[in-house]
Amino acid sequence: MEYYLPLIFFLIALFYSSVGFGGGSSYLAILSLVLTDFYEIRSMALVLNICVVTIGTFIFIKNKVFSLKQFWPFLVMSIPFAYLGASVKLSQKGFFLVLGSALILAGIFMMLRFILKQIEAKEFSNTKKLALGGAIGLLSGISGIGGGIFLSPVLNLMKWGNPRIVAALASVFILVNSAAGLFGLFMAGTFHLNRQLIVFLVVAVIVGGSIGSYLSNKKFNLKFLGILTSVLVLYVGFRLILLHGFGIKI
C-alpha cells in the first residue's frame, strides 16, 4: 500500500486545501493503517498539515481575507494549549483511543460542514473565542490534528462568519496549532519521522495543496468528495477504537 501513498495524499491535500483545511485527520487515518509507531504517525501528520495550510494561509492573506482583529482571540489560547497537548506522553493504546475518538468527531463535523446550509453570521465575544480556541487547541495537540476540521463546523453551527472568513480562520488556526504541536513534540522528545516516506509525501501534499488552493478561489465544488472523505475518517476512527479498546478487528 505504501507505493500508492503519495497519490492518496495528493488527493487528500487537494480536497482539504480547497476548503481551507490541511488534511491532518485523513493523514492520521491513513498513516495509522500502514505505520505502527504512533509518534511517527503524529509527527508526520503535523509536518504534512503545515505544508498544506502554509499555502492556503498565504493565499488568504494575499487576497485580504485574513483579519487579525477578528482572529487573534481564537489563536492566542490555542497555541499554548496545542503545545501542552502535544507534550503529553500517552501509551500507544491511549494515543490510538484518543485518535480514534478525535477522528470520529472530525468525521461528524466534516459531514455537518457539507450538509448545513449557509446561515446568517453573528459576532462572538472575545471570551467565547478564547475558550473555543483553547479547547480545540488542546485536542489538536493531543491527537495531532491541526484543529481546523473541528473549528470550522463549530463556527458554522454557532453562526459565526461567512464560509470564506471561516475557511481563512481554519487555515491560519491549523498552521499555528500544527507548529505549536510540532514544537511540543520536539521538546518532549517524541518527534519521529519515517524517512522512507516523508519526502515523497511532502512533495505530494505540496502539489495537491497548491492545486486545491487554486480551485478554492475558482469556487470548485468538491462536496461529494468531502462526504466520502468524512465516511473514511469515521470508519478509521471506529476501527481504531474497536481494535485498541476492545481487540476487535474490522
Image (cartoon, rainbow, N blue to C red):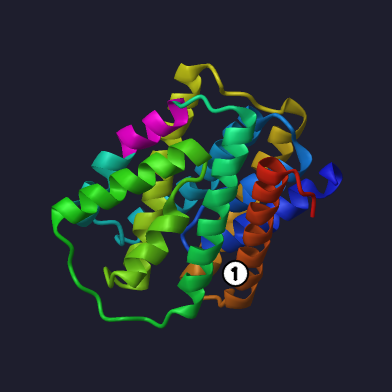
Task: Specify whether 123 is left or right of 95.
Answer: left
- What percent of the width, then of the height, locates residue 102? 52, 50
- In this figure, which residue is indicated by the disc labeled 1? 226
Q: Which quadrant holds residue 163?
A: bottom left
Magenta span has 81?
Answer: yes
Q: Nearer the viewer, residue 10 or 127?
A: 127
Task: Specify whether 117 is left or right of 232.
Answer: left
- What percent of the width, then of the height, locates residue 119? 32, 81
Q: Secondary structure at mark 1?
A: helix
Instruction: Decide: is 19 above or below 93.
Output: below
Badge 1 crowding class, 10 Å Cα cut-off, few under 14, some 14 to 19, many 20 or more, is many
Task: Specify whether 245 is left or right of 150.
Answer: right
Q: Nearer the viewer, residue 9 or 213?
A: 9
Q: Residue at x 60, y 65 (%)?
A: 230
Looking at the image, can residue 60 be seen? Answer: no
Magenta span has 168?
Answer: no
Residue type of the residue flagged with mark 1: Gly
Q: Residue at x 20, y 55 (%)?
A: 128
Instruction: Decide: is 216 above or below 43.
Output: below
Q: Nearer the viewer, residue 165 or 140?
A: 140
* Residue segment shown in magenta: 79-87
Q: Which quadrant holds residue 192?
A: top right
Q: Main secondary structure of the magenta part?
A: helix
Quarter of the picture containing the C terminus is bottom right
Q: Nearer the viewer, residue 244 or 231?
A: 244
Looking at the image, can residue 235 be seen? Answer: yes
- What percent of the width, then of the height, locates residue 107? 56, 62
Q: Residue at x 15, y 51 (%)?
A: 127
- What percent of the width, then of the height, locates residue 213? 52, 61
